[in-house]
Image: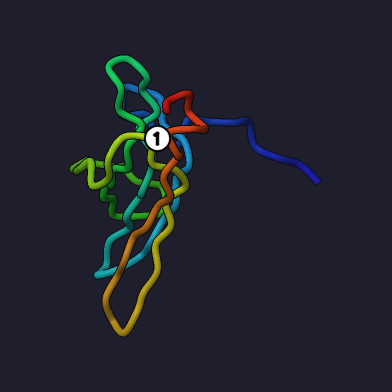
Amino acid sequence: MSFTPPEIFFDPGYEVIDATMLHASGQYWLIFKDERPEPLHKEIKIARGPSVEGPWTNIQGPFTEAWSEGPSALEIDGKYAARSGAVEAEVRGGC
């Protein structure tokens, strides 16, 4: 078994994690978490691309509040939905 060397897949100019991909309406959608701590972001955004390899453009969002985690996407009755979880204040050092 052999592997190709690692490459940067998506770099909007800041740290991102928890990406998931959806193919809909002839486009690919990359839903990801903006992981910047200063100023605080940690919210979910979405980018669009013509193929599974991008290029990823038209970054939109955020469509969640800060401290969102693990986005996912699915089709329900011909419509598309994205969801994510939230980190509770007790877990992140508040309250």
Residue sitting nearer the eye, 44 or 88: 88
Residue sitting nearer the eye, 82 or 58: 82
Please state if 61 lies on the left or on the right of 71 as rendered. Answer: left
Q: Residues within 10 Å of mark 1 (few under 14, many from 20)?
A: some
Q: Which residue is painted at 49% across and 32% down in the image?
A: 90
Which residue bears the numbered disc 1?
10
Q: Position of residue 39 (x, y in %)?
A: 27, 17
Q: Which residue is painted at 36% across and 65% down in the image?
A: 23
Please state if 20 lies on the left or on the right of 79 as rendered. Answer: right
Q: Position of residue 56 (x, y in %)?
A: 29, 42
Q: Quadrant of the C terminus?
A: top left
Q: Residue furthest right?
A: 1
The kind of residue on which mark 1 rests is Phe
Task: Judge whether 65 appears above or below 93 on screen.
Answer: below
Q: Quadrant of residue 72?
A: bottom left
Q: Residue furthest bottom?
A: 77
Q: Quadrant of residue 68?
A: top left
Q: Which residue is painted at 26% across and 76% down in the image?
A: 79
Q: Residue furthest top?
A: 38
Q: Position of residue 50 (x, y in %)?
A: 28, 54
Q: How is the image coloured?
A: rainbow
Q: Which residue is painted at 31% across and 34% down in the image?
A: 66
Q: In the structure shown, which secondary structural element does the residue marked by tag 1 occupy?
A: loop
